[in-house]
Image (cartoon, helix red, strand yellow):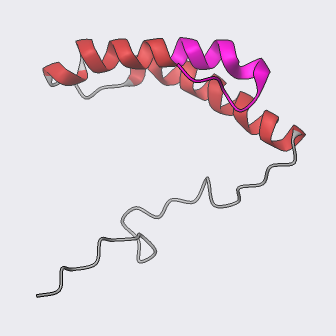
């Protein structure tokens, strides 16, 4: 597993990774799409990453923008004949 962007976030990232892998294997692959089980860990990890980014002066203003389903969503160009 990879480490997080910030050292203080490594433990929570690894906990989230383990939760996600278990959910994927035990739930998702069996048709259960509900991923609520890992949501609390994801929220903690996201907060930690955001704090680390701020402390390290990393600004990714577009990270929180949601383009899916909008005109700004990048789509695969159609194949030319």
Residue 61 spot, x, y in % from top left: 70, 60
The residue most toward the bottom is 81
Closest to the observer, 57 or 72: 57
Main SS, magenta residues:
helix
Number of marks present in the image shown:
0
11 shown above or below 57: above
Residue 62 spot, x, y in % from top left: 63, 61
**Quarter of the rendering containing residue 70:** bottom left
Question: In the drawing, does residue 57 fall left or right of residue 12?
Answer: right
Residue located 21% across and 80% down the image: 78
Extent of the magenta region = 1-16
Closest to the observer, 56 or 63: 56
**Quarter of the rendering containing residue 49:** top right
Residue 43 spot, x, y in % from top left: 60, 28
Residue 14 spot, x, y in % from top left: 57, 14
Residue located 35% across and 12% down the image: 22
Question: In the drawing, does residue 15 fall left or right of residue 56?
Answer: left
Question: In the drawing, does residue 63 fall left or right of residue 55?
Answer: left
């Amino acid at each position: 597993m990879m480490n997080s962007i910030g050292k203080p976030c490594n433990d929570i990232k690894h906990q989230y990774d383990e939760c996600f892998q278990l959910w994927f294997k035990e739930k998702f692959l069996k048709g259960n799409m509900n991923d609520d089980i890992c949501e609390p860990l994801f929220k903690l990890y996201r907060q930690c990453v955001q704090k680390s980014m701020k402390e390290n002066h990393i600004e990714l203003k577009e990270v929180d923008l949601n383009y899916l389903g909008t005109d700004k969503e990048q789509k695969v160009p159609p194949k030319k004949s």
